[in-house]
Image (cartoon, rainbow, N blue to C red):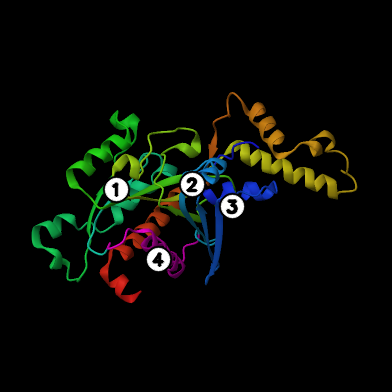
Amino acid sequence: MYEVRTDLALEAREKFEEDNVEIKGVRLEEEEVAGDIKIVKVVIETENGAKAMGKPRGTYITLEAPNMIDEDEDYHREISEQLARMLASLLPEGSKDMSVLVVGLGNREVTPDALGPNVIDNIMITRHIIKEFGTYALGEEHTRKISGIVPGVMAQTGMESEEIIKGVVEETNPDCIIVVDALAARSTKRLNRTIQITDTGINPGSGVGNHRHAINQEAMGVPVIAIGIPTVVDAATIVTDTMSDLIGAMAESSRLKGLGGTLETLDEMEKYELIRELLSPHLNAFFVTPKDIDEAVKRLSYTISEGLNMTFSGSFFKQA
């Protein structure tokens, strides 16, 4: 079985289902929400399950909303509310008065990678206000101390994001870290339509083969929750999917039947490796993003920041 290039635990789990392979130690829960929103929780419970999935033990919650790319404020607010509910379920116990550091990973100058920095631009930063004027300065009974940082990328700073964040953590002592980053998907259908939230932290760049130091509880010393939306997909994956569709069309057509020949006998791994070889060396590390990525990232950053602001608000917990 070839390695699926994706940051989404749900897609890694689906690959095993396609191959009719059962994974012990991995639990799947699904929930349908109004407005065509689907929530899937993948819980990796054992080390064997983690090894098979290629992801750390923990909880991965995926929110799928097919219309998330549309400009519908009411729909996006519903997504933000579901995101706040998901995030609240992963926050540590006794979290109403905690200090939270929100980190926007990515490169502001590269649009598909600018999700994290854009989210930081739109969250409500309160740490400095509460430190100066006290807990009730913002008029709510329970208000968290929220701080934010955009560490940039190594090409801009010469430092690992993990090094920068660790230094900030040592100085500010947050109770929890929330990391926001753009992800890579296996399926084009999930681009800009899926949100993943996990309590395992994140390995920046892993989806595009650019592995950086992990940002997780082990490295930071405090719980780390990661939120991400896939904005890019591997070019080899697109060509492989197109090949599979073409072979299927050939098999159904009386005129083209048998034209696929040897291609029909290839399994998914062989097709993928064939495409990677054909694309190499010029397009082997080629990733694709939708043409409207500028507007999509701008809109989705508002959706995530609104969900974070809801989660941090004491009034949200009173309503819940």
Instruction: Name the residue beneath numbered marker 1.
Output: 222
In the image, residue 203 sits, relative to residue 118, either above or below, namely above
Q: Pointer 3: residues within 10 angstroms few (<14), some, or many (20+)?
A: few
Q: Residues within 10 Å of mark 4 (few under 14, many from 20)?
A: some
Which residue is disc 3 drawn over? 189
Residue 229 rendering spot, x and y as whole percentages: 46, 51
Which residue sits at x=27%, y=66%? 313
Whichever of labels 2 and 1 marks the residue nearer the N terminus, that label is 1
User: For this view, does 291 lie left or right of residue 221?
Assistant: right
Residue at 49% over, 36% down: 208
Label located before the other in sequence (3 or 2): 3
Residue linked to disc 2: 231
Q: Which mark is residue 308?
A: none
Give percent across and percent down for residue 35. 52, 70
Residue 74 lies in magenta, yes or no?
Answer: yes
Whether pointer 2 and pointer 1 mark residues with C-beta atoms closer than 8 Å, the reply is no
Badge 2 marks a residue whose secondary structure is strand
Q: Quadrant of residue 260 in the image?
A: top right
Q: Mark 4 and 1 residues: CB-CB less than 8 Å, in contact?
A: no
Residues 259 and 85: in front is 85
Label 4 and label 1: CA atoms lie apart by 21 Å
> In the displayed structure, would residue 72 be above or below residue 213?
below
Drawn side of residue 202 relative to residue 129, left or right = right
Which-is-in-front pick, marks 2 and 1?
A: 1
Q: What amino acid is found at the position of numbered circle 1 in the picture?
A: Val
Per the rendered image, the range of residues in magenta is 70-95
Which residue corresponds to the image point at 49% horizontal and 48% vertical from the top-left? 230
Residue 281 position within the rendered picture, expressed as x and y whole percent measured from the top left: 59, 23
Which residue matches tag 4?
Answer: 85
Instruction: Name the side, left or right, on which 267 lies relative to 191.
Output: right
Mark 2 residue crowding within 10 angstroms, few (<14) / some (14–19) / many (20+): many
Q: CA distance from mark 2 to mark 1?
A: 28 Å
